[in-house]
Amino acid sequence: GCCCSVPQVLKSCTEFIEKHGIVDGIYRLSGIASNIQKLRHEFDSEQIPDLTKDIYIQDIHCVGSLCKLYFRELPNPLLTYQLYEKFS
């Protein structure tokens, strides 16, 4: 078993992208900043926002951008500081 479960924001976003967002550069292109903030706020205030709203379907990149933002803001990076030596 896994020691920790996948955070809901990542689970929802990645499932949504796999269902609706298999487009070129899904994680390379950025979404519209105001949509990313709106989506982030919805995750902060509700458990699981409705990602099938038109605003998110039309700007699928904001969902991918929120995933990237989540990883960027982790206190300890995914590839933890302890592993940096090994990589370099």
Image (cartoon, rainbow, N blue to C red):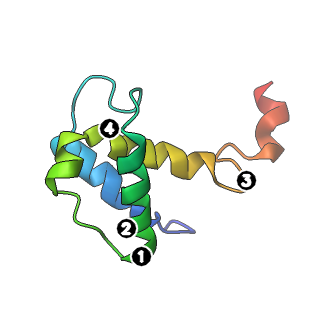
User: Do the CB atoms of the residues marked 2 and 4 lie less than 8 Å apart?
Assistant: no
Above or below residue 50? Residue 72 is above
Q: Do the residues labelled 1 and 2 touch (CB within 8 Å)?
A: yes
* Residue furthest out toward the bottom: 46
Say whether marks 1 and 4 touch (CB < 8 Å). Answer: no
Q: In this view, does 13 lie to the left or right of 23?
A: right
- Going from N to C along the chain, the mark reached first, 1 or 3, is 1
Tag 4 residue: 61
Residue type at tag 2: Glu
Tell me which residue sits at (38%, 27%) in the image: 29
Q: In the drawing, what numbered circle is on residue 42?
A: 2
Q: Looking at numbered disc 3 in the image, what kind of residue is underneath it?
A: Asn
Secondary structure state at the residue bearing disc 1? helix
- Measure the alpha-carbon separation of dots 1 and 3: 24 Å
Residue 57's mark?
none
Residue annotated with mark 1: 45
Q: Is residue 58 left or right of residue 73?
A: left
Q: Give the image location of residue 61, x and y in percent.
A: 32, 38
Camera-side residue: 66 or 32? 32
Between the residue at mark 1 and the residue at mark 4, the CA separation in whole angstroms equals: 21 Å
